[in-house]
Amino acid sequence: MPLAIVQTGHPVLRADARELSRDEIKSQEIQELIELMRETMRAAPGVGLAAPQIGESIKLAVIEDEAGEKTRMSKEELEKRERKPVAFHVIINPKLEPVGDDKVDFFEGCLSVNGFAANTARHKAVRVTALNEHADEVTIDATGWYARILQHEIDHLNGILYIDRMYSTTFTTVENKARYWD
Ligand code: ZN
């Protein structure tokens, strides 16, 4: 059973989540949580899910982007967004730094602001250092849509939502996005 996804207004989405120790990461509890989060992200469906979104105020997120048929985007739309498949992985206690000064504008949404989207500027390239589900250190260099997903999910772990960064006049329902903006 997928977990319930917390909606905006819930204080857990605005908290600075706490870091996990290496022992906690290896615990059965966290390993089971990762499995449930994977299931919940896939069921939503979404390309990322941060622990605060299922009510857990810890610095852990799961990411997976098929960038395929499920996205309902044409090949051109995927290319414009530099959106390529990203295999399932887990980031824990991540630190993010932008690479270069370039920013890109695209509409994005959030499973915790269900039914809406807005044009939001994000760094085009980022470097993330984090722990994985085995508590091993990893460094991720990402560009394009993957860089956007990382920025969005890591924001969640720091109590930030895309609506804090969006161009507010572009805020729209998903229906009206399809009707007027796409
Ligand atoms: Zn989100």
Image: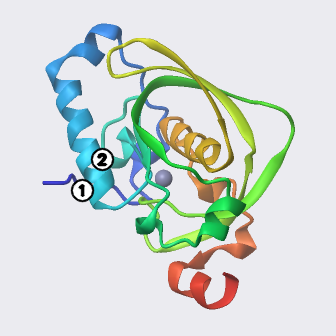
Circle 1: residue type: Ala
Q: In the displayed image of the protein, which residue is found farthest to the top?
A: 23
Please state if 94 lies on the left or on the right of 80 as rendered: left
Q: Secondary structure beneath disc 2?
A: helix
Q: List x then y, in percent, for residue 105.
A: 76, 59
In the rendered image, the vertical position of residue 123 relative to residue 116, given as above or below:
above
Crowd rating for badge 1 (residues with CA inside 10 Å; few <14, some 14–19, many 20+) = few
Residue 27 versus residue 149 in the image, above or below = above
Q: Quadrant of residue 170?
A: bottom right
Q: Which residue is mark 2?
A: 54
In-front residue for pair 61/145: 145
Graded by Cα atoms within 10 Å as few (under 14), some (14 to 19) or many (20 or more), the crowding at tag 2 reads many
Count of numbered labels shown in the rendering: 2
Question: Is residue 85 or residue 11 the one in the foreground?
Answer: 85
The residue sitting at 85% across, 43% down in the picture is 102
Which of these two is toward me, 46 or 167?
46
Q: Is residue 175 left or right of residue 49?
A: right
Residue at image coords 75%, 44%: 124
- Give the residue displayed 58% in from the left and 73% down from the top: 74
Disc 1: which residue:
4
Residue at the far front in the pictured view: 75
Which residue is found at the position 19% from the left and 54% from the top?
A: 2
Q: Please, what is the three-letter code of the amino acid marked with disc 2?
A: Ile
Q: Secondary structure at mark 1?
A: loop
Instruction: Return the disc, 1 or 2, that comes first in the chain's sequence.
Output: 1
Residue 48 in picture, x, y percent from top left? 44, 48
Residue 114: x, y in percent?
43, 68
| Quarter of the figure with residue 129 | top right
